[in-house]
Structures are given as C-alpha cells and as structure tokens.
Image (spheres, helix red, strand yellow):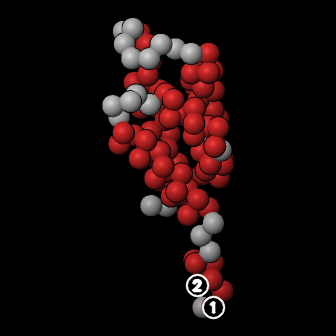
Amino acid sequence: MNKLQHLKKSKQFLRKVLNYRRNLLRRNAGKHASVNMVKTMAEIDYFLPVIVSFDRMANYLSRVTVQQNIRELIPSNKNCWKQELAELVNEGYRLKYKIGKQLELTYK
C-alpha cells in the first residue's frame, strides 16, 4: 500500500463508521449519543474534507484520543472495524517512517 492508497482507505473507513453511527442514531438503535460521541462526529465531518495529504491523515489517526473516540463510534458487534482501525494506524506509521526506499536511492 502506498501513501495515496492509505489516505483513500482511511477516508473511506471514517466515512463508513460515521454513516453507520448516524443511521443507528436516526433509528434509535445502539448506544445513545453521548456528548463526546456527537463532538467526535462533528470533528470527523469537519476534518474529512480538510485532510488532503497522507501526512495529515497519519498524524490525525496516530493521536491516542482520536483512536479512542473512533473506537467509541464503532458498534460493539463490529470487531473487524476495530482491527481495521489498528491496521490503518500501523500502516500509516510504517509508511511515514519508511526509510528503506531512501537508502536504496542513495546507494544507486
């Protein structure tokens, strides 16, 4: 996965979680909306169009508080979504601090 694919997949994942939680709230199913949950949803709504680079998305997802807030939005029966969030964070960290390609270029 390259940086552009990671950005696209991260945005797609955040939209998926946000839309699913909105539908649950609209149908009065699942957890009731807490103040923190509503704040997180508004924050994600604001940041999704603004984040246009991989570095910003990786920095946003690497924050511990953001990860906890996103986990709060994910329903309890969607454990695979929690794993997907962890994979996105790990992949972002790996891509951000990848130096192997730079070393290859300097020795050629």
Q: Residue at label 1? A: 107
Asked whether the beta carbons under mark 2 and mark 1 sit within 8 Å of each other, the answer is yes
Q: Residue at label 2? A: 104
Disc 1 crowd rating (10 Å Cα; few below 14, some 14-19, many 20+) is few
Residue 23 appears in view:
no
SS at badge 1: helix
Disc 2 crowd rating (10 Å Cα; few below 14, some 14-19, many 20+) is few
The N terminus lies in which quarter of the figure? bottom left
In percent of the image, x 62 and y 74: which residue is there? 99
- Residue 12's quadrant in the figure? top left
The C terminus lies in which quarter of the figure? bottom right
SS at badge 2: helix
Residue 15 appears in view:
yes
Is 47 situated above or below 93?
above
- Residue type of the residue flagged with mark 2: Glu
The residue lying toward the viewer, choosing from 89 and 8, is 89
20 horizontally vs 39: left or right: left
83 horizontally vs 50: left or right: left
Is 34 situated above or below 44?
above
Q: Position of residue 56 (x, y in %)?
A: 66, 47
Q: Which mark is residue 26?
A: none
Q: Position of residue 93 (x, y in %)?
A: 58, 59
Q: Position of residue 11 (x, y in %)?
A: 50, 39
Is 50 situated above or below 97?
above
Tell me how far mark 2 sits from mark 1, CA to CA. Answer: 6 Å
In percent of the image, x 59 and y 45: which residue is there? 61
In percent of the image, x 51 and y 58: which residue is there? 91
- Residue type of the residue flagged with mark 1: Tyr
